[in-house]
Amino acid sequence: MQEATKTTRLSFFGGSAGALMPLLAFVTGATYLGFAGAPDERGLWTVLLLALGLALLLSRDRERCAEVMIEGMSQPLVLLMIMAWLLAGVFGALLSASGLVQALAGAAHAIGLQGGMFCAAAFMVACLFSTATGTSLGTIILCFPLLYPAGAGSGASPIWLAGAIIAGSTFGDNISPVSDTTIASATTQMATLGDVVSSRLRYALPAAAASMLGFVLLGGGEPVADSVSTSIDLSALLMLAAPAFVLGLLLRGTHLVVALAAGIGVAIVLAVGGGFVSWSEVVHIDPQAYGARGLLVDGLDRGVGVSVFTLLLMGIVAVVEHTDLLSRFSSGESARTVASGERQIFGAITASCLLTTHSSVAILAVGSTSRRIGERLGIPATRRANILDTTVCTYPFLLPWFIPTILAANLTATDGVMPRLTALQVGAANLHSWILLAVICAAVFFGYGRRTGTDGASAKPAGF
């Protein structure tokens, strides 16, 4: 997303307050539905439509406002996410129908992974996947359909298990050298990628260790399903080759859509060839319903809710980006000391993240301002990059109106016996992001890491 120029900026009745009203209306509605226990992201469609209507009502140029909304919805990034959601729904439906989830549950039971230990293991798997691929959303897409329903008979708390998976997805997004936020934070601050990654471990590893302990202690509960049957056919573990194939493609730098599409092809071959599902279960014509039915259709339907949510949300975000709200929050001219400069960088990236609802976009929006503050006050480039990246790896994985929490909640809607959770529940159980938020606050307000290690290194050009 590109920052709006002055000539394209939207103006609203009521000034900045009027410009902020649509986003506040959405946030208020999403939070209310979260506390009310509404589990379906489709319930947010109405809230988003009302917010878009409010933006049109308050805009001084309604035609231009409508154009901005459509431009925001039609960005390549948005279409990429929608395509990923749809393909992920199909992929998850195929793996679930093949019996892989039950086989994973049986294998976990056989090796004694129960309760909090199962949650901790899920956290580690998600950490490894997200670190290897650098994508939190990709990790959520692949890990939730497998690990969440597999916890049904393990005695793992559904809420803490969901929290463990999204927490592991957060970990890699924060430290992986191929993560978009890592690259954005390093390049905008002119820091070397190696220094940024190595210095960031000081924040990420303590948070991960504390999270692991927390999931072990808190993750136990009553089994949601009866004890895992010893008669489960573990041959369905063969289906793990499909997500492993997707992981291999992503590690080679393959496009996410290409990797998911290829994974679906492999999953179909394995599922039908292995006798886990029949071809008619994959897809068939239902004359009475005048349409196609099967796992492909069911999987696509799983992705519709979050896809429409993403479209409408990006319309609101585009409106915010075409106002002067971001520039008001990120001037940074009043900072006079290193401590106050770091607080202003933290405040600017927090505001940008909450307003744009997108991690890397938030970094790009305030990157130049953060670099200007840091260079004027002598804040090292790695330190600035760490403040930016660590901050954006908290709010989107905690608050119930961001895409990661909405997507994770959507993927708890399985055909098994595990309960469907709300985005509020998933985010609240993400121990890693909560602890990471506490760590970065300690860094900014109390100086943790300010004069130690590579966070105290001098700024130098990015090394790509």
Image (tube, rainbow, N blue to C red):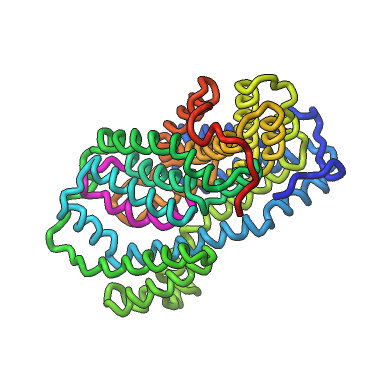
Decide which of 38, 346 is in the foreground and name it.
346
Spot occupied by residue 114 in the image (x, y as percentages of width and height): 20, 45
Decide which of 430, 450 is in the foreground and name it.
450
Vertical relation: 136 (above or below) 219: below
Residue lying farthest to the right in this orientation: 7
Spot occupied by residue 190 in the image (x, y as percentages of width and height): 65, 43
The residue at 37%/68% (across/down) is: 242
Is residue 401 visible in the rendered structure shown here? Answer: no
Judge left or right: residue 73 versus residue 410.
right
Q: Quadrant of residue 163?
A: top left
The residue at 54%/65% (across/down) is: 255
Judge left or right: residue 200 versus residue 227.
right
The residue at 55%/25% (across/down) is: 444
Does residue 144 belong to the magenta stretch? yes
Spot occupied by residue 182 in the image (x, y as percentages of width and height): 55, 46
Does residue 253 belong to the magenta stretch? no
Is residue 70 visible in the rendered structure shown here? Answer: yes
Instruction: Determine the main secondary structure of the stretch shown in magenta.
Output: helix
Vertical relation: 225 (above or below) 459: below
* Quarter the C terminus occupies: bottom right
Q: The magenta stretch spans which residues? A: 135-158
